[in-house]
């Protein structure tokens, strides 16, 4: 086997292994938070496994600007209702999704694993911060991650949030079973144009090799819905903007 092929295989394996965790903490990882001595500016010092949080060059979130027009193909969305269990993990409210809902990106399928929220938004678009952001986390058969990020602005009530958050667990490390399935489809804007960049998990261990697709157009949630989420969190749960370095934001 020639050296270039070996190098390519090594890189592919490294990216896959870096993205095996779907926004979940390692059983023995150090505790982290969004405030104080365990906040984002200290994540890289809390645990050797969090080193990328301070040394990584392809970190997320970012301020999306200086776009490169590359005529991105449409994302194929194949979602069906499937959210049953809602978890307050102490860092966000997460809805775990049943198997069978996928996206297709340039011929590769990624299965939806869960969606969760941040307030205010983690990513910015041309310098603009939004009141809230949804992350729909997917993984392909090799464990590579793809995140659909949707900005949420103050406006009309969102029916999926109305259903899911009617029983929002307000204590950390608590799971509730939703009486009715919710659909991730309701978290997508009608216009599904998007920006794309290579990034990382926005929480420790900040693993890189994550494909980010940020919807250009926001959806809405009511002021009461946004306030309810913020109240349960108790403080902002957004990682600060990271340096773009040599990366391109394509559209």
Image: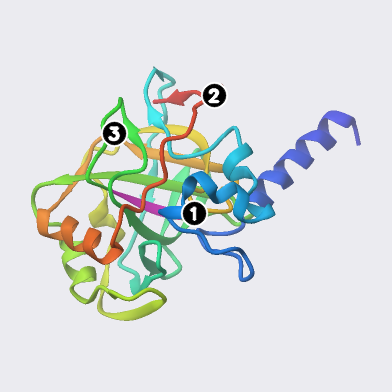
216 lies above or below 174: above
SS category of the residue bearing label 2: loop
The tag earlier along the polypeptide, 2 or 1, is: 1
Magenta stretch encompasses residue 153: no
| Residue indicated by mark 1 | 37
| Residue indicated by mark 2 | 245
**Lateral position of residue 11 relative to residue 127, left or right:** right
Tell me, yes or no, if residue 19 can be seen here.
Answer: no
Q: Nearer the viewer, mark 2 or mark 3?
A: 2
The tag earlier along the polypeptide, 2 or 3, is: 3
Tell me, yes or no, if residue 75 can be seen here.
Answer: yes
What quarter of the picture does the N terminus occupy?
top right
| Residue indicated by mark 3 | 216
Query: What residue is at 38 percent from the left and 28 percent from the top?
Result: 64
Query: What residue is at 64 percent from the left and 54 percent from the top?
Result: 142
Label 2 vs label 3: CA separation?
22 Å
What quarter of the picture does the C terminus occupy?
top left
Circle number at residue 198: none
Question: For this rendering, which residue is in front, 5 or 208?
Answer: 208
Query: What residue is at 66 percent from the left and 44 percent from the top?
Result: 15
Q: Nearer the viewer, mark 2 or mark 1?
A: 1
The tag earlier along the polypeptide, 3 or 1, is: 1
Quadrant hosting residue 179: bottom left
Q: What segment carries the magenta color?
A: 133-137
């Amino acid at each position: 086997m020639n050296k270039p092929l070996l190098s390519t295989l090594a890189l592919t394996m490294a990216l896959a292994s870096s993205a095996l965790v779907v926004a979940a903490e390692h059983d023995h990882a150090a505790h982290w938070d969004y405030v104080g001595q365990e906040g984002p500016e200290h994540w890289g010092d809390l645990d050797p496994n969090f080193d990328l949080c301070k040394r990584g060059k392809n970190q997320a979130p970012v301020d999306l600007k200086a776009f490169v027009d590359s005529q991105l193909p449409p994302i194929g969305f194949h979602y069906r209702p499937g959210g049953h269990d809602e978890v307050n993990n102490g860092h966000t409210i997460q809805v775990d999704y049943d198997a069978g809902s996928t996206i297709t990106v340039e011929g590769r399928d990624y299965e939806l694993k869960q969606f969760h929220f941040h307030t205010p938004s983690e990513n910015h678009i041309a310098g603009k911060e939004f009141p809230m952001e949804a992350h729909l986390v997917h993984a392909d058969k090799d464990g590579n991650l793809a995140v659909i990020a949707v900005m949420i602005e103050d406006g009309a009530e969102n029916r999926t949030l109305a259903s899911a958050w009617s029983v929002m667990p307000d204590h950390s490390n608590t799971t509730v079973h939703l009486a009715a399935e919710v659909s991730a489809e309701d978290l997508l804007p009608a216009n599904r144009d998007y920006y794309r960049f290579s990034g990382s998990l926005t929480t420790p261990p900040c693993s890189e090799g994550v494909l980010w697709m940020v919807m250009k157009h926001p959806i809405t949630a009511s002021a009461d819905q946004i306030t309810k989420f913020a109240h349960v969190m108790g403080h902002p749960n957004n990682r600060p903007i990271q340096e773009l370095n040599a990366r391109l934001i394509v559209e």
